[in-house]
Amino acid sequence: MSDWPLWRRLQPFAALVLVAALIGIPLWLVVATAGKSQGEAINPDLSPPSQWHLLDNVRTVWTEADVPAAFLGSLIIVVPTVALVLVLGSMAAWVLARRSSRLIAALYALGISGVILPPAVVTVVLLLRQLGLAGTVIGMICVYLGIYLSTVIFFVTGFVRTIPVALEEAAQIDGAGPLLVFRRVVLPLLRPVLATATILICLYVWNDVFYAFFVVGGRLDTLPLNLFRVASAGLYLNNWHLIFAYVILMSLPLVVVFAVAQRRIISGITGGAVK
């Protein structure tokens, strides 16, 4: 029992060491391998490179793998998808949270069913072909909307229920309509949960290769599809230093999104605490 207080003091440090190991070791493997020459990177390990070639490898990937076009393709899909998912999902969650009936309960269960039920890829592709959207950016965005709208509804609905209804009633007394109440009152209060949803949706869509392969594969290049294509074509065969350099390039935009959204989360929580 005498050792218990000492263990309680060591728990935070043990947790930090564990988290640093779980995150730091894979991260170091990626960076170290991306910085090696082709000969050193044949068998990826945790050893540091004898001489760093990270910038040269990144430059090679950028020019030879047609990364700018793939980056543009990813942006064309990710940006509208995230914006539409957040706006439509938060509006639907607001309505579902402020209404109470059996129909609303059934609609909520239907709305979050996508969190549990995986979409049928073959059916989705056939449906897109019938609608004339197969192989198009709009079709890909619609697929992601159908997949991840449930996630936003699930997250935001519970958060909306914690917002006092009196704030919305005060705006309505001042003559604000439903859209104005949502835009001026509800939406600013949803920033913390929307920032979290942004990180998740960006992570899912940016790194997706499975659905993109079946819907727009061969017609539009995204970063994951481009990496799959060049690796399958043999350009990166046994060139692990180039593959890991590509992974670093592909991950940098997500790091930026995470940094910005993390600041939004902290500012939103702080603002709520002050109020």
Image (cartoon, rainbow, N blue to C red):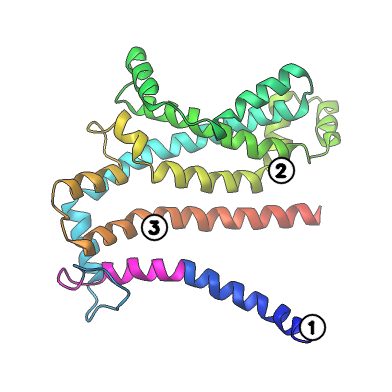
Q: Main secondary structure of the magenta part?
A: helix
Quarter of the picture holding the N terminus: bottom right
Of the residues shown, which amino acid type is indicated by label 1?
Met
In the drawing, what numbered circle is on residue 252?
Answer: 3
Front position in the image: 148 or 63:
148
The local secondary structure at tag 2 comes to: helix
Of the residues shown, which amino acid type is indicated by label 2?
Leu
What segment is highlighted magenta in the picture?
23-40
Looking at the image, tell me whether mark 3 or mark 1 is earlier in sequence order.
1
Please identify the residue farthest to the front as the structure is shown.
Answer: 1
The quarter of the picture where residue 198 lies is top right
Mark 3 nearby-residue class (10 Å; few <14, some 14–19, many ≥20): few
Residue under pointer 1: 1
Disc 3 to disc 1: CB gap under 8 Å: no
* Residue 260 position in % (x across, y down): 53, 55
* Residue 220 position in % (x across, y down): 26, 34
Gap between marks 2 and 1 measured at Cα = 46 Å
The local secondary structure at tag 3 comes to: helix
The quarter of the picture where residue 9 lies is bottom right
Is 230 on the left-hand or right-hand side of 268? left
- The residue at 33%/60% (across/down) is 248
Residue under pointer 2: 189
Work out whether 161 lies above or below 56. above
Work out whether 40 lies above or below 253. below
